[in-house]
Image (cartoon, helix red, strand yellow):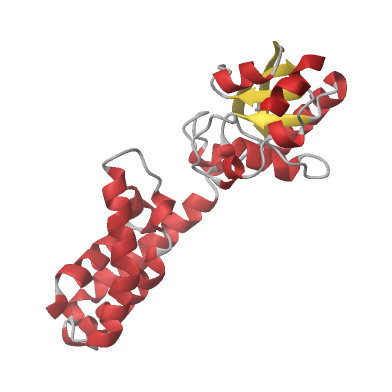
Amino acid sequence: AQQAGVISPLLFFGLTIALCWPRLARTAKFETGYLISLFLPLFLLYLFLSFQKASQANWAAAAYVGGLILVAAKWTEALRTRPHLRWLAFAGVGLALLETGILHETSWLHLPELLDPLDRARGSRDLAAQIDELQRKTGARFVIANKYMTAALLSFYLPDQPDTFMPVSSPPFNQIVLWPTYRTKHPADNAIFITDSNRVPTSVTEDFSGIEPIGEIRTSEAGRSVGRFDVFFCRRSPSDDARNSCK
């Protein structure tokens, strides 16, 4: 359902017809099979995963490289024999263009905080500026975030684009968890932990001798409040160096 909403319901409907109704239009079998092989396995994989846990609409984006070419080929041929379907094709493309415009900029919709999907990526410069100021005040050498998106955005927007980290206990869902951890790169340094859930994971509390709440950060962009985070100062003691070396 999310994928249909993102690429346009009519385009998604057209792709479904192209896959399930081969007689819609006569097309070369080899080329059609090649495009289906690019689309269907990846699409079915994420369809299966969506029954196991929540998924995101962009996960199957690579499948649509072949899928949309298949739609174009099938419907171009179909319109030659069924010209009355032309309005459906134009409506599908028009709706897709409208959705693209809306999805690239939603600020004009004036959606409430937490309901605008693009707010996840807004306010990153403001967040980085506030974190940088806290690092200078506290002397923290690096930043840990509870989510990979926060860590990745801070890595890009903080001065000198430093390495940022996630809790060591995080499941390996992304490359930040797979890269060298702060235990390896900062075994004796203090840190700032930033979270949107006001909870410090057990692995972080085990790695630092003292964790103090610094306060709350609210980020804004273009005069709108777009995010809220809780920040903690993670302090090491001299004995932490030896303890982390053992780990």
Q: What residue lies at 18% left-to-right and 82% top-to-bottom?
A: 25
Q: What residue lies at 34% left-to-right and 48% top-to-bottom?
A: 2
Compared to residue 75, the image places residue 217 above or below, namely: above
Answer with left or right where residue 24 lies relative to residue 4.
left
Residue 27 percent coordinates (x, y): 23, 86
Residue 244 percent coordinates (x, y): 70, 25
Compared to residue 52, the image places residue 101 above or below, namely: below
Answer with left or right where residue 12 lies relative to residue 105.
left
Q: Quadrant of residue 28?
A: bottom left
Q: Examine the rendering and report whether any part of residue 201 can be seen.
A: no
Residue 21 percent coordinates (x, y): 14, 72
Answer with left or right where residue 45 lies relative to residue 149.
left
Answer with left or right where residue 243 lies relative to residue 139.
left
Say which of 196 and 170 sits in front.
Answer: 170
Compared to residue 240, the image places residue 16 above or below, namely: below
Say which of 50 and 247 sits in front.
Answer: 247
Q: Examine the rendering and report whether any part of residue 228 can be seen.
A: yes
Residue positioned most to the front: 246
Q: Which quarter of the figure is the C terminus placed in?
A: top right
Q: What residue lies at 58% left-to-right and 18% top-to-bottom?
A: 200
Compared to residue 203, the image places residue 102 above or below, namely: below
Residue 74 percent coordinates (x, y): 25, 79
